Image (cartoon, rainbow, N blue to C red):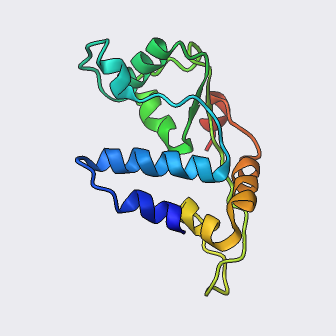
Amino acid sequence: MGRIENVIYQDYKYLSDLNIALIKELINILGINGNFLLSSDFTKKYKSTSVRSERVMELLEWAGASRYLSAFGSYDYMKEDNFDFKKYNVIFQNYEPVSYSQIHSDVFVPYLSVLDAIFNIGPEQTRYLIENGTKKWLTPEERSKF
């Protein structure tokens, strides 16, 4: 896919610049719209030495966020760090991969890059899988039972 190659073969000073460019191109390919903010945008205005959960809570506060969509695996360290689940209305993704046809594979291999799905089934079907892979978002109480 030429659009991805165009992003990859640019000169970047930092790996994070490549990652940001790839994410922006992928959401463009998938037709996802939204307002994306970088934590570095806030650190220009606010000074912080916070880490882990404390840093995330600062960013949520600075962004005026009322909800935090978190990865399933983040729960344990957030709990350990006394993350304020209620203040930020945290919900955890419980993603279940939906199988799709993968070239050169007789068996579906889950949890690959979104690029695998885009290259195998195209952007429209990939977006459908992303939107329908999370059957239910879990509250912290529901997530704690796993």
Residue 76 in the image: above or below residue 125:
above
Q: Is residue 130 left or right of residue 116?
A: right
Query: Residue 54, located in which quarter of the rendered image?
Result: top left
Q: Is residue 56 left or right of residue 94?
A: left
How many labels sit on residues? 0
Image quadrant containing the C terminus: top right
Residue 125 in the image: above or below residue 105:
above
Image spot of residue 138 (x, y percent): 68, 35
Residue 70 in the image: above or below residue 85:
below
Q: Nearer the viewer, residue 13 or 67?
A: 13
Q: Nearer the viewer, residue 67 or 86?
A: 67
Q: Is residue 94 left or right of residue 65?
A: right
Query: Residue 110, located in which quarter of the rendered image?
Result: bottom right
Image spot of residue 111 (x, y percent): 57, 63
Image quadrant containing the N terminus: bottom right
Q: Nearer the viewer, residue 31 or 59?
A: 31
Q: Which residue is rendered at x = 30% and y = 20% of the image?
A: 43
Residue 54 in the image: above or below residue 29:
above
Q: Which residue is rendered at x = 59% and y = 35% of the image?
A: 144
Q: Which residue is rendered at x = 45% and y = 52% of the image?
A: 22
Q: Nearer the viewer, residue 146 or 100?
A: 100
Image spot of residue 127 (x, y percent): 71, 53
Image spot of residue 73 (x, y percent): 51, 44
